[in-house]
Amino acid sequence: MSVTAPPAPAPTGSLAGRRIVFRCDASQRIGSGHVMRCLTLAGHLRQQQAECLFVCREHPGHLLALIRARGFVALALPAPTEHTAAGACSALAHADWLGVAQEQDAQECLAALQAAAMLTAPIDWLVVDHYALDQIWERLLRPYCRRLLVIDDLADRAHDCDLLLDQNLGRTPADYATQLPALAIRLIGPRYALLREEFAAWRGASLARHRSHPPEHLLIALGGVDQDNLSGQLLAQLEHCALPATCRVTVVLGRNAPHLAALRRQASQLARPCQVLAGIDNMAEVLASCDLALGAAGGSAWERVALGVPTLLLILADNQRDGAAALVEHGLAIALTGPEQLADGIATYARQAAQLQQKLNPPPNDDNLLIDAQGCRRIGQRLHALLQPLTIRTANAADEALLLAWANDPQTRANAFNPRPIAAAEHHGWLQRVLAEPARHRLFILQHADGQALGQIRFDRRPDAPGNGDAWELSYALAPATRGQSLGARLIAAGCEAQWQALGPQRILARTLADNQTSRQTLSSLGFSETQGEDGHRHFVLLPDRLPKRPDHENS
């Protein structure tokens, strides 16, 4: 099979001059996945002309040499000792993966960055991908960065970050409801999976190639380390499997895999052709050429789904169980309980091949498309956008068409108290009245510093408000293109601050539909108290002494 990959995209310079630091580790115990997905993101950001640097601890099996071979600066933290490992104990499920206490790791990280002259100004983005780090470590590093991104899969600990990425199927934003600051943005699901651009390049050809038929090429890829040599156990099971005599086998591992030499000896003795590849840089091409993969239930699962490759899944760690279950539930893979189940798994695949291919190769315009290999692009856009300061301004007559388009967006109307569309003439008269009476109505637009409008917030005076009388009631709407970016909280926070700066602190009221959980959670997270409810509405109040947190981090 052959395909002409598109040329690499030209650097856009959207992150030119931005300094981005990654804190992640690899080891024989941790595996290579955290470092590899950070390398994937760093490679994309480098194309946007960002300066990326890694900080990693020298665990046995670290990947510092690989990071440097990819052209990135990699600062090494000292290997754990028996003494430091004893201090790593904490309530976190994976605390011992760090090898030291979080406070010590933070101090050593800062010292390494200081020695590398990286602390002369705040780092633009600090990216943390480590199950043994939480808000304790993040708060110690916060003063030295403008923004902080956490990459997580577990939703089992609290974070202090601006942006959280969890690319797992089955995860929801609600899983992090109590674990993040109110204004943190949550990017959830495989749309944000960190895949190298080669997967986007090979996606079309691979999807076109894959059809349900007896496998002629079997791929075994269980991560870079495969500490327990499951690859060897699978090879031993092949003689019991109903595979075509012509079926060839490829095994892929990392260069530092401890059982690499033994696997090569074992492969040379198989009755069918078998090659063992180590440390390859064309994984997408290899995947696109196979008919069936035996793979882990971690991040690499999305590489296979993106290319439409049917998979027999093996769970290599407890933290992969939920992800594996979600893949099976969506009909994207078949799960094995262990290598001894290989023959049964291949038999199941033979029966379900057509259904698997239907799920793995949906129409390109399918609204339910799970993954398109564009996750890095989406993350890069968010990193760029969140470095742009948000400003709020008073609306004016020139905003009329924009406000009408936002107001008549179908989702906005569905969440409005009156869902009918608004006529242009009616909207014109309303806007003229609002702008003409600032003592009764205040209307603001939230925007990026470059002028891109993001949403509107309005305050209407209520001199007869329940409670202590005079108050202002807010209503707001986001630009449809900005939904899912957690901008509602930023809009309300900035609007309340602008309102109080202009008129002095006063009570601010809000109402939502009872079933509008997003607005209710947003208001509660910003300090609004729910007071009463009637006629299918929920009522909230923000008191003058509870100004919401500023929408931008102090180092912006």
Image (cartoon, rainbow, N blue to C red):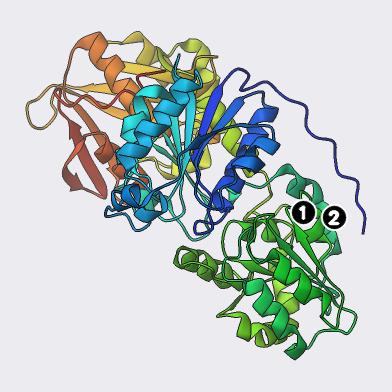
**Could you tell me which quadrant the C terminus lies in?**
top left
Horizontal and vertical percent position of residue 144: 39, 23
Label 1: element kind: helix
Mark 1: which amino acid? Ala
> Residue at coordinates 86% horizontally, 80% vertically from top-left?
272
Percent of width and height locating residue 210: 82, 66
Residue drawn at point x = 42 percent, y = 56 percent: 154
Q: Quadrant of the N terminus?
A: bottom right
Give the residue pinned by disc 1: 284
1 vs 2, front mark:
1
Residue 231 falls left or right of residue 10: left
Q: Count numbered badges in the picture.
A: 2
Using the rendered image of the protein, determine whether residue 358 is visible from the camera's viewpoint: no
- CB atoms of marks 1 and 2 within 8 Å: no
Q: Residues within 10 Å of mark 1 (few under 14, many from 20)?
A: many
* Residue 225 in sight from this viewpoint: yes
The vertical placement of 327 against 340, above or below, is above
* Residue found at the far front of this picture: 82
Residue found 47% across the figure and 31% down from its top: 126
Give the residue pinned by disc 2.
205
Please state if 101 lies on the left or on the right of 16 as rendered: left
Residue 522 drawn at (x, y percent) = 32, 39
Any mark on residue 58, and which? none
Residue type (three-letter) at the residue carrying disc 2: Ala
Name the one closer to the observer, 390 or 429. 390
**329 in relation to 132, above or below:** below
Residue 354 picture quarter: bottom right
Most foreground residue, 476 or 329: 329
